[in-house]
Every structure is written in C-alpha cells, then in structure tokens.
C-alpha cells in the first residue's frame, strides 16, 4: 500500500463519485477505479459499494476514510517539519535543566542532535523545576529536564521518563542507624525528615510521602529546604534524615553518610514540553531522545529499560535520517 492509494480512496470516499474524484486527481476514471480496487484487494475489505447510479461507503470504508485522512495529514506535517529544518526556519532549541540533577541523557542526546542538525542552535538554561514549568508555559524554553513526573503532570504538560535512579537515605554519620549497611525505610519512621520544597523541587513532597506510605508510615517533616546544600547541612548537624536520588551522593557532604533502602526506592528523571509547541527542532530532538532511550539501558541501577539493547550511537543516527 502506498500513500497514493490512500489519496485516491479519500477522493472517491469524499466525493462518492469516481468521475468527480478522477477530475480532482487529474486521472482517468478507469485508472482511479482500478487503483481503489487494488487497495480493496490488498486490504481484503470492501470499502465502497458501487452501482450504476451511486457510490456509497461501507461501514468499513467510513472507518478507513477517517484513518486514511489522519495518516495523509500526518505525512504532510512530517514533510513540512523537515522542510522547515532544511530552510532553517526553526533555528533555535531552548532546553531547561536542573544543574544538580544533570540527567545522563542530556549531554549524549544533545551531541547526537547537534551532529544530525548542525544548523540548529541549542541553548541550555539552568533552571529549577518550578522555573522550568513556568518557562515552558510562557514559551521561553521548548523542553525541560524537569525530573519527577508529578511536576509535569500537574502542570498539564506532555512528559516522558528518560531515566530511572535509585534513592538513598542520607543520615548524620553519628546516628546509630548509620552504622548499618542497609536500612528499612520503616526504620526512619520515628525520625524527622528534611525535605525539598515544592517550589524548588516540584513533585518531591508527593514522591517522598508516597514512598513512606508504601512503607506504612507518614514522614514527620521538620523542615522544607530550597537547596541541596541546605538539606545536607541540616542532615549533617543531626536535625533529621532525607531520602534523595543517588545522583546527589556526588556532593560528598561532611558528617553525612548514605545508605541504600533494603527495599529499593526509585526516582524518575522526566522531560516535559507543551503539546501546543509545533517547533520542528523540538520534534527532531524528541525523536533523538526516543531513539536513544529505545536503544539504551537506563543509566543507573533500577533501570526502566532492562533487557533492551546496549547503546548504539550509529543506530540512533540512522533513525534521525530515515
């Protein structure tokens, strides 16, 4: 089946006349009739009922007409998108990210994107989750590495997970629990928690609450903080404990130790964008990320792509140029 077969059928289905459809397509009527018949034979479904007086759509034909029109419209959109890139009409791609949660996916996919589309200028903006959501809504950035999905979901943005990480427990080093190699999350129930605020780490309070409720307790939150340094300072001075992504272990804060929960707790890293953003550069970058995540295991343990093939940059570039 080729797109021309769909065009021929759509013309016949919309006009319900092979004569008028042939005139629209600048074809002879016998040629159009033959092409539509070939399509029906290939599908094994009768799409049009023909008599000498009239042409009618069958029930299957009505359904196929709607789907064919959508597919033809999508094909036009794809062509226009790549033509825009070729004409450099969409020359800029603005990306937001949180510096201390610098997703492993970002540097690799950005390199692949710039290799495939060297004429598009990509700009990075270091923004916390709240500011990324605001920038997305206002059209100041095209895509954000927003972290937890709750932020994007609640903001009405489109999103997809790109990586999954283990969570670890941050404790004061002089706490008796810190001497254990692994802890049950329930062991922390009597303790105070230091928590990232919703304004700086959107979705984190909901994620922490859900993780603790799964362990059958409600976290006793002593303090909400904006910065990672403030959180670890509070933990290090013995004010409480925290549950954080393993990415933050690179801070190596003084007087703080990290222990893994015995029952694994996971945190996602997500990208988000506005559904209404028609930028060809955005769509091209989303295609790069989709291809990369499809061919690459998640960068940390607890990966959400287990069992998939290892990273193949050459295969990803092939996807870009199809």
Image: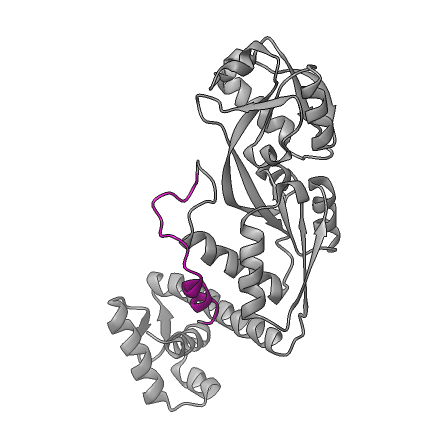
Q: Is residue 189 left or right of residue 70?
A: right
- Residue 178, percent from left and from top: 55, 16
| Residue 105 image position (x, y, % from top left) | 54, 51
In the displayed structure, would residue 61 be above or below residue 199? below
Give the quarter of the image for residue 48: bottom left
Residue under the point 55% across and 68% down: 115
* Residue 196 rendering spot, x and y as whole percentages: 68, 28
Identify the residue shown where x is 35% and y is 52%. 309
Specify how the rendered protein is coloured: one colour
Quarter of the rendering occupied by the N terminus: bottom left
Give the extent of the magenta segment: 303-321
Q: Is residue 307 visible?
A: yes
Q: Is residue 216 visible?
A: no
* Residue at 49 percent of width and 39 percent of height: 164
Residue 308 in magenta? Answer: yes
Q: Quadrant of residue 120?
A: bottom right
Towards the viewer: 252 or 34 = 252
Magenta span includes 170: no
Camera-side residue: 80 or 215? Answer: 215
Left or right: residue 86 compared with residue 19: right
């Amino acid at each position: 089946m080729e797109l021309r077969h769909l065009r021929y059928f759509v013309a016949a289905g919309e006009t319900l006349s092979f004569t008028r459809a042939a005139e629209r397509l600048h074809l002879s009527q016998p040629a159009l009739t033959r092409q539509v018949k070939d399509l029906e034979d290939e599908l094994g479904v009768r799409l049009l009922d023909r008599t000498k007086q009239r042409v009618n759509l069958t029930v299957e034909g009505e359904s196929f007409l709607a789907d064919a029109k959508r597919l033809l419209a999508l094909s036009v959109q794809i062509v226009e998108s790549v033509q825009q890139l070729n004409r450099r009409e969409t020359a800029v791609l603005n990306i937001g990210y949180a510096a201390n949660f610098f997703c492993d996916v970002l540097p690799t996919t950005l390199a692949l994107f710039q290799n495939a589309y060297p004429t598009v200028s990509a700009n990075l903006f270091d923004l916390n989750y709240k500011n990324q959501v605001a920038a997305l809504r206002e059209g100041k950035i095209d895509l954000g590495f927003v972290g937890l999905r709750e932020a994007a979901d609640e903001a009405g943005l489109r999103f997809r997970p790109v990586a999954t990480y283990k969570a670890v427990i941050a404790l004061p080093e002089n706490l008796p629990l810190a001497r254990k190699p692994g802890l049950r999350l329930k062991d922390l129930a009597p303790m105070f928690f230091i928590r990232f605020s919703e304004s700086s780490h959107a979705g984190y309070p909901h994620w922490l609450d859900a993780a603790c409720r799964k362990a059958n307790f409600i976290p006793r939150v002593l303090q909400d903080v904006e910065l990672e340094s403030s959180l670890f300072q509070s933990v290090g001075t013995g004010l409480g404990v925290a549950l954080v992504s393993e990415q933050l272990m690179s801070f190596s804060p003084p007087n703080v130790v990290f222990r893994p929960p015995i029952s694994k707790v996971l945190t996602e890293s997500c990208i988000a964008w506005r559904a209404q953003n028609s930028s060809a550069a955005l769509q091209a970058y989303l295609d790069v990320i989709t291809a990369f995540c499809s061919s690459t295991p998640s960068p940390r343990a607890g990966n959400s792509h287990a069992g998939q093939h290892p990273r193949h940059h050459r295969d990803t570039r092939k996807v870009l140029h199809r």
